[in-house]
Image (cartoon, rainbow, N blue to C red):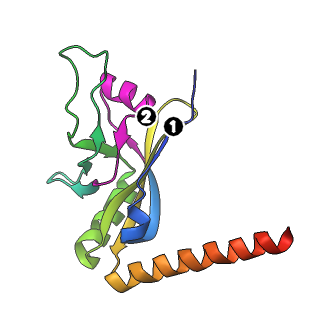
């Protein structure tokens, strides 16, 4: 029954430089977890922010409605609370407010106990020239791998 669910935010590592990562639990309703287990979630435009009480929420995370849900179905783009230790929350809040860093969800997965978890990263936005360097490095690595493969054969 347990299948490997790992939903990634592919734009995160391209648009941001990840400085630190954390694993957080996420508060979900009944139809939300069922939809995630079917792989119907999207993290591409999502980010995290603190509310007035100091709680961390994921904003813009798309979890599609469950197909077999009735009128108890959830809202697809609702804010969802993240669960972290008090010490981690305090550290993240300090970094965000003082340094101007952002918190980005990197991937959403189901652990071995069946609970939904989110890997979040403390990130710094990349400039345009940094993105160009990333593309250039990726292309040269691909070409180098091609040459190595043709040389070995």
Residue 73, above or below 100: above
| Image coords of residue 33 (percent x, y) | 38, 28
Tell me what residue is drawn at x 54 percent, y 74 percent: 138
| Image coords of residue 55 (percent x, y) | 24, 50
Residue 113, above or below 81: above
| Image coords of residue 31 (percent x, y) | 31, 23
Q: Name the image quarter holding the N terminus.
A: top right
Marks 2 and 1, Cα distance to the nearest angstrom? 6 Å
Q: Which residue is mark 2?
A: 39
Circles 2 and 1 in contact, beta carbons < 8 Å: yes
Q: Name the image quarter holding the C terminus.
A: bottom right
Q: Residues within 10 Å of mark 2 (few under 14, many from 20)?
A: some
Tell me what residue is drawn at x 30 percent, y 72 percent: 101
Answer whether residue 31 is magenta in the image.
yes
**Foreground of the two, 13 or 52:** 13
Answer whether residue 26 is magenta in the image.
yes
| Image coords of residue 46 (percent x, y) | 28, 53
Q: Which residue is mark 1?
A: 5
Tell me what residue is drawn at x 47 percent, y 76 percent: 135
Q: Which residues are magenta?
A: 24-46
Provide the secondary structure element on which disc 1 rests: loop
Query: Quick check: 143 left or right of 37?
Result: right
Q: Sequence-wise, which precedes: disc 2 or disc 1? A: 1
**Foreground of the two, 114 or 32:** 32
Tell me how many marks there are.
2
Q: Quadrant of residue 90?
A: bottom left
């Amino acid at each position: 029954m347990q299948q490997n669910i790992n939903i990634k935010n592919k734009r995160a590592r391209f648009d941001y430089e990840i400085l630190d990562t954390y694993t957080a639990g996420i508060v979900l309703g009944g139809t939300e977890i069922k939809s995630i287990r079917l792989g119907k979630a999207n993290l591409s435009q999502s980010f995290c922010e603190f509310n007035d009480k100091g709680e961390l929420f994921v904003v813009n995370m798309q979890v599609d409605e469950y197909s077999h849900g009735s009128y108890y179905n959830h809202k697809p783009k609702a804010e969802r609370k993240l669960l972290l230790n008090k010490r981690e929350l305090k550290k993240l809040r300090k970094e965000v407010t003082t340094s101007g860093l952002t918190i980005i969800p990197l991937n959403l997965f189901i652990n071995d106990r069946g609970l939904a978890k989110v890997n979040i990263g403390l990130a710094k936005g990349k400039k345009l020239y940094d993105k160009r360097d990333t593309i250039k490095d990726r292309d040269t690595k691909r070409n180098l791998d091609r040459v190595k493969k043709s040389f070995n054969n």
